[in-house]
Amino acid sequence: MSSTAFFARWRVRAGYPLAAVVLWLARPSPQSILAGAIIGAIGLWIRARAAGYLQKQQVLTVTGPYAYTRNPLAFQEYARAVPLFFPRLTPAKVSAESVGAFSLAQYKKNREYRAAIGFLLLLLVFIMIWRLRLP
């Protein structure tokens, strides 16, 4: 198994032990919880928007957020037109089969609501840690 395939397979699972360490060491305050909630909500919004366009294993998605920055796949025309890490200021025009707008049905099909549920549960855990550590 290549290192890329290994990372792709284990990237989410590797986060669980790391999350446990972070929770153990966490010393949240109301300010840090609020800041984290705002940053996390922005991240969830971006993730949800991307999931509404992404049709996994069906077509190359080059619209929505994927017109500004690409997923790490090796489609040559797409890779030349769309940067990997730092987003473009304008959407790329790539001639591909993928067209369309955001779809709530696609968001649900990709099961991205699980990220929102996990985020809310994590916020509750931080609030509980903060409340339990008060003198």
Image (cartoon, rainbow, N blue to C red):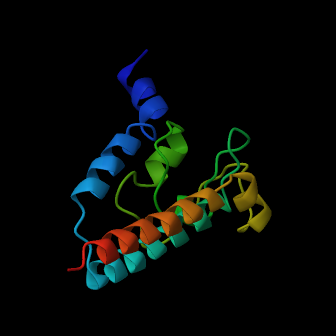
Q: Quadrant of the C terminus?
A: bottom left
Q: Position of residue 100 (x, y in %)?
A: 74, 63
Q: Residue at x 33, y 68 (%)?
A: 129
Q: In this rendering, is residue 6 above or below 48? A: above
Answer yes or no: is residue 91 visible: no
Q: In this rendering, is residue 34 above or below 72? A: below
Q: Position of residue 107 (x, y in %)?
A: 70, 60
Q: Residue at x 40, y 43 (%)?
A: 16
Q: Position of residue 28 (x, y in %)?
A: 26, 73
Name the one closer to the observer, 122 or 13: 122
Q: Position of residue 41 (x, y in %)?
A: 47, 75
The quadrant where residue 125 appears: bottom left
Q: Residue at x 27, y 78 (%)?
A: 32
Left or right of residue 84: residue 109 = right
Q: Quadrant of the N terminus?
A: top left
Name the one closer to the observer, 116 or 96: 116
Q: In this rendering, is residue 58 above or below 108? A: above
